[in-house]
Image (cartoon, rainbow, N blue to C red):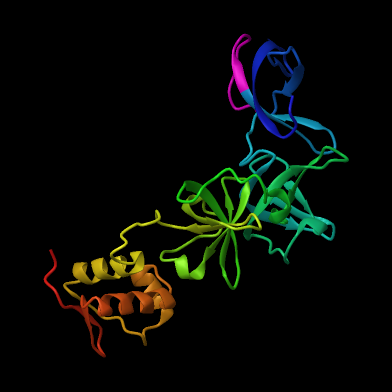
Amino acid sequence: MENGKIHKLNIVSKDSKGYTLQDDKENQVFLPLTGVGEDYSEGSSMEVFIYKDRVRVVSSKLPIAEVDNFAFLKVNLITDHGAYVDWGLEKDLFVPVEEQMEELVQGESYVFFIYEDEDSGAIRGSQRLEDFVFFDEIDVERGQEVTILPFRTSQLGVNVVVNNLYFGLIFNSDIHKEVLIGSPTKGFVKQIREDGKIDIVLEPLGYKQSIDPAAQKLYDTIKKSGNYLALTDKSDPAEIREVLGLSKKAFKRAVGHLYKSKKIKITPEGLYLTETPK
């Protein structure tokens, strides 16, 4: 039975201490009654999570994520040797100090990769995400829709894991809506670079080519606000993000796009539509 994986097993016997479970190859494990939320009968099946810490553990509780997966997990405890993060089980997942990329804060959440230690077989967590993605044999293509997990911001943009396998980046210039660290979402492959990294955009390629997505969002918001919006290039970035979900840089670019298209009039008080909305 694979370490760090969820298994659906058959119940072959039950006594006062727990259940004896068996897979299709007749490998057996014992599940103590402690923590089992409901009563199961012999002959039925149940899902359990099997993993190794110091010893092998069989749990009826299932983790937030299995081994070889990325997950957004909350730090419960920090020690000199490492951090303990909540992955949904009775015992927290250990993240050794050497697997941390920054100073972790208790109570905060971060993206970790869940891996099996090659020497001990223990299941551990790591922030060194680039060590667990592939930079060759990339099995996606330009324009393809993919699942992305944002995990870190940089000067260039937001780093993401693509399809739980690859390293991607959304450039700041391609961010037209809020991107939350640790929140899986959909993206689209813009380009696969020679170094194996993938450029990602948040809208399908060619989407509304006649108008930038940020400009479309600004236009729609002005329209819904009675053809006037009290935002200018002097507005506070926090106010712009609250109203539009855009950065100030994206807002100013969208204003420029609409102005050049003669769709809006810019005044010291705000923005007006110059055409009759359809």
Up/down of 144 relative to 60, above or below? below
**Does the magenta run of residues contain 41?**
yes
Along the viewing direction, whichever of 178 and 155 lies nearer the viewer: 155
**Quarter-wise, where is residue 263 in the image?**
bottom left
Badge count: 0
Q: Nearer the viewer, residue 176 or 151?
A: 176
Residues drawn in magenta: 36-46
User: Residue 134 in the image: x percent, y percent?
Assistant: 68, 48
Residue with the most extreme right position: 119
Nearer to us in this view, 232 or 8:
232
Q: Position of residue 199 (x, y in %)?
A: 54, 59
- In the displayed structure, 270 sits above or below 127; it is below
Residue 233 position (above or below residue 59): below
Q: Compare residues 201 and 102 and report the one nearer the observer.
A: 201
Question: Quadrant location of the N terminus?
Answer: top right
Quadrant of image for the C terminus: bottom left
Name the outermost residue toward the bottom. 268
Q: State the image coordinates of residue 186 (x, y, percent, origin top left).
A: 46, 50
Magenta: main secondary structure: loop
Is 24 placed left or right of 240 in the picture? right
Q: Residue shown at 75%/32% (left/top)?
A: 3
Q: Which residue does the image show at 70% across and 28% down from the upper left?
A: 34
Rendered residue at 68%/64% (across/down) = 105
Dividing the picture into quarters, in which one does residue 159 lie?
A: bottom right
- Is residue 63 depicted above or below 255 in this figure? above
Residue 194 percent location from the top left of the image: 63, 57
Q: Is residue 63 magenta?
A: no
